Amino acid sequence: MFLNRQHLSTARTFGVAMVVALGLASCATYDDEFATINSRLDQLDTRVQGAAQSAESANQSAQQANQRLDQLESRVQRIEGAPGRAPRG
């Protein structure tokens, strides 16, 4: 009976050791996959930041163009509303 309990205890310890070993081995695989995914996310983040900067620059340019158009619009309205000149000669 003592021999059976000792074998059972040894088998249980061996089983736990195998589960731990397999768990650690699978973690290494996941670490590689996580590293790949993190690398892709970093690349995407860089692209998104670049796109956001480009969009901000385009937005500023559009706002400046709108301001110039507003200035030109007021000048055109003044010229069109001004009384006509008498022809020379």
Image (cartoon, rainbow, N blue to C red):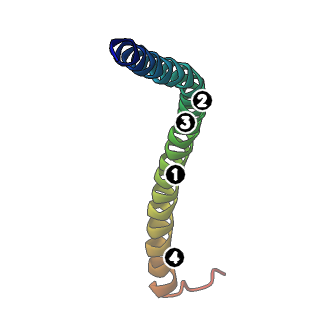
Quadrant of the snapshot with the C terminus: bottom right
Q: Secondary structure at mark 1?
A: helix
Give the foreground label among 4 and 1: 1
The residue singled out by tag 3 in the image is 41
The residue that appears at 45% across and 18% down in the rendered structure is: 11
Q: Which one is nearer the viewer's eye here, 53 or 70?
A: 53
Sequence-first disc among 1 and 3? 3
Residue 61: give its label.
1
Relative height, residue 6 to residue 42 (above, below): above
Q: Amino acid at mark 2?
A: Glu
Sequence-first disc among 2 and 3? 2
Give the foreground label among 2 and 4: 2
Relative height, residue 16 to residue 71 (above, below): above
Q: CA distance from mark 2 to mark 3?
A: 12 Å
Crowd class of label 2 (few under 14; some 14 to 19; many from 20; radius 10 Å): few
Give the foreground label among 4 and 3: 3
Q: Which one is nearer the viewer's eye here, 23 or 41?
A: 23
The extreme right residue here reads: 89
Sequence-first disc among 2 and 4? 2
Give the foreground label among 1 and 2: 2
Give the foreground label among 1 and 3: 3
The residue singled out by tag 2 in the image is 33
Residue 76: give its label.
4
